[in-house]
Amino acid sequence: MLSVLPVRAVAVVDRRLARRSMTFAPAVGALLGLAAATVLVVARWTGGTALLSAVLAVGTLAWLTRGLHLDGLADLADGLGSGKPAERALAIMKRSDIGPFGVVTLVFTLLLQVAALTALTESSPLSAGACLVTACTTGRLAITWACGQGVPAARPEGLGTLVARAVPLSRALLATLFSVGVSFGVSVGVVVMTRPGLPPVEPLKPLVAMAAGLVAATLLRRRAVRRLGGITGDVLGALCECATTAALLCCAMLLP
């Protein structure tokens, strides 16, 4: 569900499987971020411009996720932007087409991601790759927290019903610790390889970006729950893109 990578088929998709899947979502994000970061660094080191490298990295993420999260972002933008009551907004989100709110939101979000990555890549491709891993992990961690005990489903059927309130607090905290460890570890590795004289506080900056991404996703989640009555699969995709973008922007502003 979180990537195009094939997995072994399961006989029963139930709440137990949903809880496990949503708990491990940040691990999938870390792998996706690592793949996109590899594309970015290789493209830059083989003569590509910072802008081209950033576009290829963002495109890699869209391909590796089938554009699923971007589609959710566009659908949520159309639903919330319509100003309709919850039932009508959910019906708009379920349609296969994309309205003007969705198009504008998609373009704006992708531009922000590419612009932030371009700025980071111009400074240091390795640092940009580390920030991308952090951002992708943060985006999936936002999904884990959105599936916590206090967040209901907006519909009586669909993905939201399966995963809503599936992740207990203890598992969400473990997923957060894993995400922090990945971000800190990758950042320390980059610092050691490229700028060993820097003080140890430098790798803490991506952790600030992770916090910024989670705050942005939390605000959007609250807005969606208040307007729609709960979460859906589209809401989860939108939260992922929101947290990823906010983390990248924060990295671009914090890192030299």
Image (tube, rainbow, N blue to C red):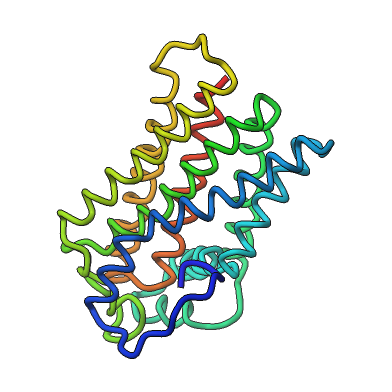
In-front residue for pair 71/11: 11
The C terminus is located in which quarter?
top right
Residue in view at x 80 percent, y 36 percent: 49
In-front residue for pair 82/146: 146
Dividing the picture into quadrants, the one containing residue 17 is: bottom left
Residue 103, relative to residue 10: is it above or below?
A: above
Percent of width and height locating residue 133? 51, 44
**Side (left or right) of 221 relative to 103:** left
Residue that sits furthest to the bottom in the current view: 11
Percent of width and height locating residue 150? 17, 62
Residue in view at x 53 percent, y 39 percent: 248
**Side (left or right) of 164 relative to 80:** left
Question: Could you tell me how many numbered marks the image carries?
Answer: 0
Residue 245, relative to residue 184: is it above or below?
A: below
Residue 60, relative to residue 14: is it above or below?
A: above
Percent of width and height locating residue 175? 28, 51
Residue that sits furthest to the right in the current view: 47
Residue in view at x 65 percent, y 26 percent: 124
Percent of width and height locating residue 236? 39, 65
Residue in view at x 29 percent, y 74 percent: 18
**Side (left or right) of 130 relative to 100:** left
Dividing the picture into quadrants, the one containing residue 155 is: bottom left
